[in-house]
Image (spheres, rainbow, N blue to C red):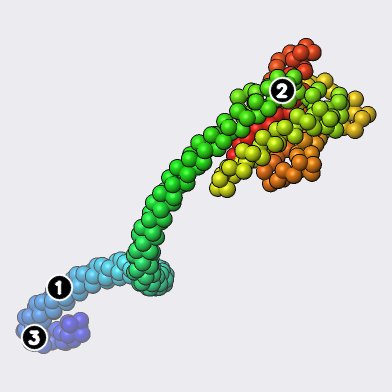
Amino acid sequence: LDTRLAAALLAETSTAEELAAARAAAEAARTATDADREAIEEKLAAALAARLGAEDRSKAALGEAERQRALLSAANARLAEEQAASAEAARKVTLLNEQVAALRGQLGALQELLDASAAKDADARVQIEALGSQLNSALARVAAEEKRRAALEEAERLRLEEEAKSLKAQTQELARYRSEFFGKLSEVLAGREGVRVVGDRFVFSSEVLFEPGSATLSPEGKSQIAGVVQTLQEVAAVIPPGIDWIIRVDGHTDDVPLSGQGAFRDNWELSQARALSVVRYMQDDLGFPPERMAATGFGEYRPVAAGESPEARAQNRRIELKLTER
């Protein structure tokens, strides 16, 4: 546009004609210029509009880019969170897998225990059944044994009753013979000093049979014992063999202790020796069966008279003869 104006001005200075022509041309050019300017203005307006549009689009693009960056940043943060959550979830899954594996192991062990328990239960049931069978057999045997025992007990009861009846009869019979023996012996010993009847026993004073401190029978003592044995042999001849009887010879002393310097250490030995001396004389000299005799010494521990008087002590020094059951 500037070039065209310069050319027109140059032509105007040359000639007027040329000026007119130039003016016309200038008018035309101006007209064209105006048209061009309008076009240019339109182009500029369009360019401006395009620029503004581009700027707007650029701004919009920038805004979109910022938004996209923001979204990308948020997405990356979310991704990081998701990755962290995924890693935590993976850790938890791994932990859960380990726990599941441990639980499976425990379940396996429990299953083994259950299987073993089931096997034991089965064995126990078999054993219980076997024990039940054995128990039934044992109960049957016990019942049979109890029945047999009851029969034996009844038989034993009857036997004991019969034996008791027999013993009672023997006791009664022995009592009769004892009564006969004591009756006859009382007649034999009647009036003799130092002999007395006390219940079912004949009591001889030790002074009649022995010297003081001695266990050797005196002649008077032998005479006394011989009379007893003669009467006893008469009674023993008619006592039935089924009655198990004996003559018990008991020796007793007073409570005066021995010196210990003599033949006997104490009254135990003295009482025993005196009872044995009577038994020996009855067996060796008078022929009385030894299986029908027993000798016992009680020392001073079974007194019949209390006190320390000479009379009481004299009563306690004694030999007792008793016809009794074994």
Question: Alpha-carbon distance for marks 3 and 1?
Answer: 33 Å
- Residue under circle 1? 49
* Element carrying mark 1: helix
- Residue 169: percent from the left, percent from the top? 48, 40
Residue 71 or residue 145, whichever sits in front: 145
Which amino acid is tagged 3?
Ala
Residue 145 visible, this angle? yes
Q: Who's the residue at 72% across and 32% down the image?
A: 227
The vertical placement of 297 against 212, above or below, is below
Residue 302 occupies quadrant: top right
The mark that comes first in sequence, 2 or 1, is 1
- Residue under circle 3? 25
Residue 1 occupies quadrant: bottom left
Q: Nearer the viewer, mark 2 or mark 3?
A: 2
Q: Is 65 positioned to the left or the right of 320 in the image?
A: left
Q: Who's the residue at 68% across and 22% down the image?
A: 190
Question: Alpha-carbon distance for marks 2 and 1?
Answer: 176 Å
Which amino acid is tagged 1?
Ala
Q: Residues within 10 Å of mark 1 (few under 14, many from 20)?
A: some
Residue 48 visible, this angle? no
Q: Who's the residue at 38% across and 64% down the image?
A: 141
Please identify the quadrant where the C terminus is shown: top right
The mark that comes first in sequence, 3 or 1, is 3
- Residue 164: percent from the left, percent from the top? 47, 43
Looking at the rendered structure, which numbered label has been put on residue 195? 2
Tag 2 and tag 1, C-beta contact below 8 Å: no
The mark that comes first in sequence, 2 or 3, is 3
Residue 55 or residue 162, whichever sits in front: 162
* Element carrying mark 2: strand
Looking at the rendered structure, which numbered label has been put on residue 284? none
Question: Alpha-carbon distance for marks 2 and 3?
Answer: 209 Å
Tag 3 and tag 1, C-beta contact below 8 Å: no
